[in-house]
Image: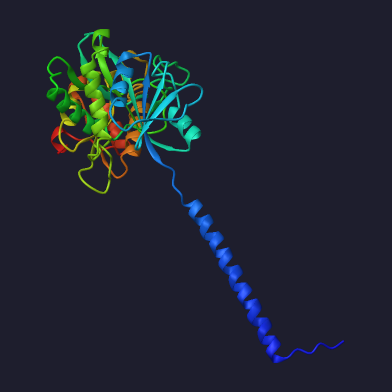
Amino acid sequence: MILKISGRNILHFLHTHNNRLKANATHIQSLLNANNRVTVTTRKMVTLIVATTADPASINPAAAILAMPGWTAGPILPPDIKSFSNKQTRVIQHDRSIVKEDDLDLRWEEATGEVVDEVIFLSRHTAVSNRPALTVHPIGVLHLKDGESPPQGGKPGWAALPSTRIGPWFRLLKKMAEAHGLVPEFEITLEATHHGPITNKPTMFLEIGSTEEYWKRQDAAQVMALLMWEGLGLGGSEEVGKWKSETGKRKVLLGIGGGHYAPRHMDIALKDDIWVGHLLSGYSLPMEDPTQTKTTPGENYIGGNWRQSIKAAFEATKASFPGGEILAHLDHKSFKGWQKKAITEFLAEESINVGKPNDFT
């Protein structure tokens, strides 16, 4: 059989199939565009504020900020942790020890699909002096050896990423406490790095101290709530303490040595535009006295976990402040000569720059 096809039929055939090909191509492109729109969707970045009902110095500031406008009930974080949402901020409340509830940032991300950008813990502060205080500090237990049990959460050798807000919020807290009449009754202070819980995101603790009388003080709780409200930009103003490596001053304090309240480091942290990373007190720098240990004559090695502490603190601080100029500041008066020599030599080996007070301007 011979099929005769005219030129006109051939043209009609080609025209019809060309239109179908164009239609299919348009349909395929629309599907690709739709898929592309799905793949480029970004997950919401949120700040996680953590409180425990077991501690009045924790739950009272949480209740005070939740009394401010804009909050809605959020999801339950398994097994039974309540949450509340306001813009980019989430408040969660559990009923256990604030330093023992680990990985809340990862658990929140798994439960909600949101990405936790930072974690702020609310807690009580205790001190031998019993003096009333409002404190800010980073967390970690950098000096412990593997196998040792941290008394207040965390894990040996671990340093959390320090929140970039520590320095700016410390200065803002001081101003707010003065404006609300808490000073001089309350001391406004930084604390050295200590305790848990384990987190994977930039973290800081806000604490009220130092006895039950002051843990329950509503005026102190209100100031802490205002600090978070303004510092996170929940009231409509620009947030405070968000790191931007491409703008502004970039000097970051890494405190080494001194007591728990780091007075000499705190003098630097009070300067405008100075950022604060980890603060290592003397107890986080265990060093073995060479006169008390058996060493080979001429050997200069100083034992103890102090190297581990410094390195972990530096690496975590550097990770929190990309592009920042990390400057180690030594509390010289807190060290003996052999300690200061060993530390400065180690800092040079690790290419960690040392700054004097006048370098932090």
Q: Which residue shows up at 50% across the image and 34% down it? A: 110
Rendered image quadrant of residue 265:
top left
Q: How many marks?
A: 0
Q: Which residue shows up at 24% across the image and 25% down it? A: 340
Colour scheme employed for the rendering of this structure: rainbow
Q: In this view, does 352 lie above or below 139?
A: below
Locate residue 277 relative to residue 50 in the image: left or right: left
Q: Quadrant of the C terminus?
A: top left
Q: Quadrant of the N terminus?
A: bottom right
- Where's residue 318, x and y in %? 32, 38
- Where's residue 194, x and y in %? 33, 21
Rendered image quadrant of residue 301:
top left
- Where's residue 211, x and y in %? 26, 9
Q: Would residue 336 be seen by someone viewing this image from the given angle?
A: no
Q: In this view, does 338 lie above or below 118?
A: above
Outermost right residue: 1
Q: Would residue 313 be seen by someone viewing this image from the given angle?
A: yes
Which residue is more in the foreground, 88 or 269?
A: 88
Which residue is more in the foreground, 356 or 35?
A: 35
Q: Which residue shows up at 44% across the image and 15% down it? A: 149
- Where's residue 279, x and y in %? 27, 26
Locate residue 155 relative to residue 16 in the image: left or right: left
Q: Is residue 311 above or below residue 189?
A: below
Locate residue 199 relative to residue 244 in the image: left or right: right
Which residue is more in the foreground, 276 or 199?
A: 199
Which residue is more in the foreground, 333 or 266?
A: 266
